[in-house]
């Protein structure tokens, strides 16, 4: 596609429910990233994929969070048993590769999650 | 000390003035730096990338890097109301074998350009 596509754009869920957020990166981009942006916390890294593998999951805040990527393309971020503190914008980004050299990282428009 | 620090502002400048945004970083080994612009309710978009000491110019934007002092700045000349946004400084990891895209962001500086 032309850009990084994320769905849903907005999600309101009840505390304790599971949610899935989807990211479709730019075609041909092998590296995919998930970030979270919440009020007062800024943008924080969650996880990244190179192809289908996730070499760095260090930013996932708890074991309620998981992500997978299949076919080297679409990725899903799953939050189990959502809590109110999970309310944030979840941003997906992609780049041609994960190596150095100034690869531009392109962000999607984000999935706005509200846990009530 | 946070790894990447920015003055959260808000910074208010009149139209046509120069807006100066600053960012300091703690890892002396950091090699390169990004400036992103984020409009309210939108995703961040890259506006500048710099890795060499000195200045890098792109249109009305100039990024300045001083590795000895560990700061990077963004100057916006002839500021326009459309430049009103949050500006984010981001630093990729210094360590080898780590994804370049694992950026550490500052908190962002809110810029308002008033007519």
Image: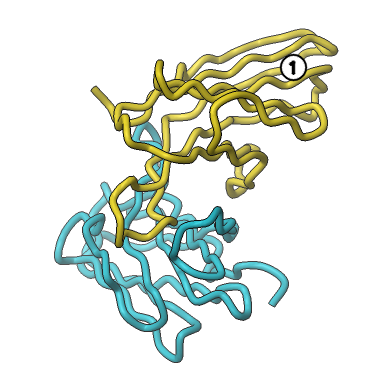
Chain colours: A cyan, B yellow
Q: Nearer the viewer, residue B71 or A58?
A: B71
Q: Position of residue A71 (x, y in %)?
A: 45, 91
The N terminus of chain A sits in image quarter: bottom right
Give the SS element for disc 1.
strand
Q: Write the residue at 31% across / 80% down.
A: A53
Q: Position of residue B111 (x, y in %)?
A: 63, 21
Q: Position of residue B68 (x, y in %)?
A: 40, 19
Tell whether B108 sits left or right of B40: left
Q: Taking A91 as reference, is B29 above or below it?
A: above
Splitting the image into 4 quarters, where does residue B61 fall?
top right
Tell whether A55 sits left or right of B66: left
Name the chain under label 1.
B
Tell whether A73 sits left or right of B55: left
Q: Position of residue B21 (x, y in %)?
A: 58, 19
Q: Write the residue at 42% across / 63% down.
A: A33
Numbered disc total: 1
Q: Nearer the viewer, residue B28 or A64?
A: B28
Q: Write the residue at 72% across / 72% down.
A: A2
Q: Residue furthest bottom?
A: A71
Splitting the image into 4 quarters, where does residue B114 fall?
top right
Q: Taking A29 as reference, is B76 above or below it?
A: above
Q: Taking A78 as reference, is A40 above or below it?
A: above
Q: Taking B9 as reference, is B34 above or below it?
A: below
Q: Write the residue at 56% across / 58% down.
A: A103
Q: Which residue is mark 1?
A: B113
């Amino acid at each position: 596609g032309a850009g990084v596509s994320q769905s849903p754009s907005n999600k309101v869920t009840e505390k304790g429910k599971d949610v899935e957020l989807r990211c479709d990166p730019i075609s041909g981009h092998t590296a995919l990233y998930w970030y979270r942006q919440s009020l007062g916390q800024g943008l924080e890294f969650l996880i990244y994929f190179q192809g289908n593998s996730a070499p760095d999951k260090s930013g996932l805040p708890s074991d309620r969070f998981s992500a997978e990527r299949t076919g080297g393309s679409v990725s899903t971020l799953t939050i189990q048993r959502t809590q109110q503190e999970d309310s944030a914008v979840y941003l997906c980004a992609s780049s041609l590769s994960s190596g150095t050299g100034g690869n531009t990282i392109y962000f999607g428009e984000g999935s706005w999650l509200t846990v009530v | 000390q946070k790894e990447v620090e920015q003055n959260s502002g808000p910074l208010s400048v009149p139209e046509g003035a120069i807006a100066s945004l600053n960012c300091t970083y703690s890892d002396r080994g950091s090699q390169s730096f990004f400036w992103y612009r984020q409009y309210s309710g939108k995703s961040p978009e890259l506006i500048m990338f710099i890795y060499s000491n000195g200045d890098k110019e792109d249109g009305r934007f100039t990024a300045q890097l001083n590795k000895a002092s560990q700061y990077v700045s963004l100057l916006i000349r002839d500021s326009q109301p459309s430049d009103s946004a949050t500006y984010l400084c981001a630093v990729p990891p210094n360590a080898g074998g780590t994804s370049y895209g694992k950026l550490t962001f500052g908190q962002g500086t809110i810029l308002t350009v008033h007519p």
